[in-house]
């Protein structure tokens, strides 16, 4: 039976605390689109996406109106295209990117993910051809998102792939220099990538997924932050319990929307990703949650401990609310998308080294970080290698999404607009890892990967 207090509390969460469904993402398998003919492949992919997702946006809008719950994004993820491209040349993969763009425009979604490759143990010719044109694909499209998985705990770290991704990031920045190098905001490098993630830019439809599926990403940092602020002077055990209860309520909202969307569209419900995904809006910040716990500013000593507790409590509350939790599920710490993170960087309290430490205990990794445009390619590779090693060593997902903003230096900022927000250019340690990176090869899997 519904309690009136629960209804009023949910209304307050939506109206005053920025509670929303961050995304409804439809995953679509492209395996049956495979063809030796380039034009036939692109046409089959276009037809399948526009048929399966024809009513996705309309359904999301109807549910939004029915329940009064904002659904910010409607998105599509597809099978990593390097797995279905076969013998496509680099030019063929570029043509495929434009096909995905046209399909996304046709159905009206915000983004389409899956311009992706899985190269954690080695690269096929298909994957190599795809990676070679990622910068051009991102520069020539606005809705296509790309991801590359370069490591797993089982396989170790593919340093040759990291070297290619450092180059791809620099070229994507150069090709979109007239728009604050925004191409890099649509490109993410992963370790232990999840195959059911609904969030961009890393979403794709994994090899073990059904033909079509609905995955939903919830949000709600503002709700958690407000709850902690109202709790007053209580101990950390009580704070952890409060976060669990709040995460339960947020996830139940997501479960309601996901179930309704799946039923209306006639496809299976996949997972709820219960990540706390911040926005640039004031009051919708993961950094402010940590500060409401008692830190003077995010980045102070104690930040990693506070974030670890937050992440654990969110997961514990979320798994009680849904039987199907997946994706990334935890607390995101993207700099440009979090008003509190931006403020902490501007105060000098938060460095890239501290962010790297924080990623050991939370979701994703070094996310939406703007760095000087003249950062050497090998330094970017070193940033990727460091972050990816945290994921491999800790058997968790980590990722890197950095933007070497062309023409920008420390002290400048870049404005991406919308949910991507703006970011101050962060200083880096520029001592060169070039010799280490250029050795190439693979860093072997850690000993604890041998669990069979």
Image: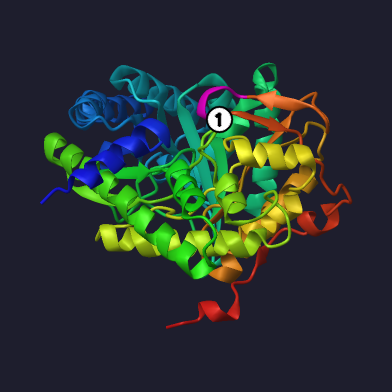
The verdict on residue 383 being magenta is: no
The verdict on residue 419 being magenta is: yes
Q: In this picture, is 212 found above or below 240?
A: above
Residue drawn at (30%, 42%) of the image:
9
User: Visible in this render: residue 62?
Assistant: yes
Residue drawn at (53%, 27%) of the image:
137
Q: In x, y percent, where is residue 5?
A: 23, 46
Q: Depth check: 209 or 111 in front?
A: 111
Residue drawn at (59%, 26%) of the image:
136
Q: Which residues are magenta?
A: 416-420
Horizontal relation, residue 428 to residue 2: left or right: right
Q: Which residue is denoted by mark 1 in the rendering?
A: 420
Q: In this picture, is 360 found above or below 108?
A: below
Most frequent secondary structure within the magenta stretch:
helix
10 Å crowding of disc 1: few (<14), some (14-19), many (20+): some
User: Visible in this render: residue 76?
Assistant: no
Q: In x, y percent, where is residue 243?
A: 43, 58
Q: Depth check: 100 or 419 in front?
A: 419
Horizontal relation, residue 275 to residue 184: left or right: left
């Amino acid at each position: 039976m519904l309690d009136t207090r629960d209804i009023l509390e949910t209304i307050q969460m939506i109206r005053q605390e920025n509670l929303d469904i961050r995304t409804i993402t439809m995953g679509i398998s492209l395996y049956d689109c495979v063809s030796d003919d380039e034009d036939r492949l692109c046409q089959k992919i276009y037809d399948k996406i526009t048929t399966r997702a024809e009513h996705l946006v309309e359904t999301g809008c109807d549910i939004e109106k029915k329940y009064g719950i904002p659904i910010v994004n409607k998105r599509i993820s597809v099978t990593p295209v390097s797995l279905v491209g076969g013998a496509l040349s680099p030019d063929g993969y570029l043509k495929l990117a434009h096909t995905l763009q046209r399909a996304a425009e046709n159905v009206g979604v915000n983004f389409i993910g899956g311009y992706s490759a899985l190269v954690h143990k080695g690269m096929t010719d298909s994957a190599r051809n795809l990676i070679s044109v990622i910068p051009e694909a991102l520069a020539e499209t606005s809705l296509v998102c790309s991801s590359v998985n370069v490591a797993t705990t089982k396989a170790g770290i593919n340093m040759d792939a990291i070297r290619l991704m450092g180059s791809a990031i620099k070229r994507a920045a150069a090709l979109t220099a007239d728009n604050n190098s925004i191409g890099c905001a649509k490109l993410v490098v992963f370790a232990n990538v999840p195959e059911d993630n609904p969030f961009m830019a890393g979403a794709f439809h994994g090899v073990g997924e059904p033909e079509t599926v609905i995955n939903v990403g919830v949000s709600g940092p503002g709700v958690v932050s407000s709850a902690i602020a109202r709790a007053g002077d209580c101990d950390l055990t009580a704070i952890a319990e409060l976060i669990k209860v709040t995460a339960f309520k947020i996830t139940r909202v997501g479960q309601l929307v996901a179930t309704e969307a799946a039923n209306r569209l006639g496809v299976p419900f996949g997972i709820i990703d219960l990540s706390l995904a911040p926005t640039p809006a004031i009051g919708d910040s993961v950094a402010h949650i940590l500060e409401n716990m008692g830190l003077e500013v995010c980045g102070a000593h104690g930040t990693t401990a506070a974030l670890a507790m937050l992440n654990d409590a969110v997961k514990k509350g979320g798994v009680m609310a849904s039987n199907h939790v997946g994706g990334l599920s935890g607390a995101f710490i993207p700099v440009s998308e979090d008003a509190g993170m931006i403020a902490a960087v501007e105060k000098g309290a938060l460095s890239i080294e501290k962010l790297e430490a924080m990623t050991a205990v939370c979701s994703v990794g070094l996310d939406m970080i703007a760095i000087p445009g003249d950062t050497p390619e090998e330094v970017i590779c070193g940033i990727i290698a460091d972050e990816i090693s945290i994921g491999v060593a800790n058997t968790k997902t980590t990722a890197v999404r950095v933007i070497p903003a062309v023409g920008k230096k420390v002290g400048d900022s870049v404005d991406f607009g919308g949910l991507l927000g703006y970011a101050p250019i962060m200083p880096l340690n520029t001592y060169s890892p070039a010799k280490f990176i250029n050795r190439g090869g693979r860093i072997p899997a850690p000993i604890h990967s041998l669990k069979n």
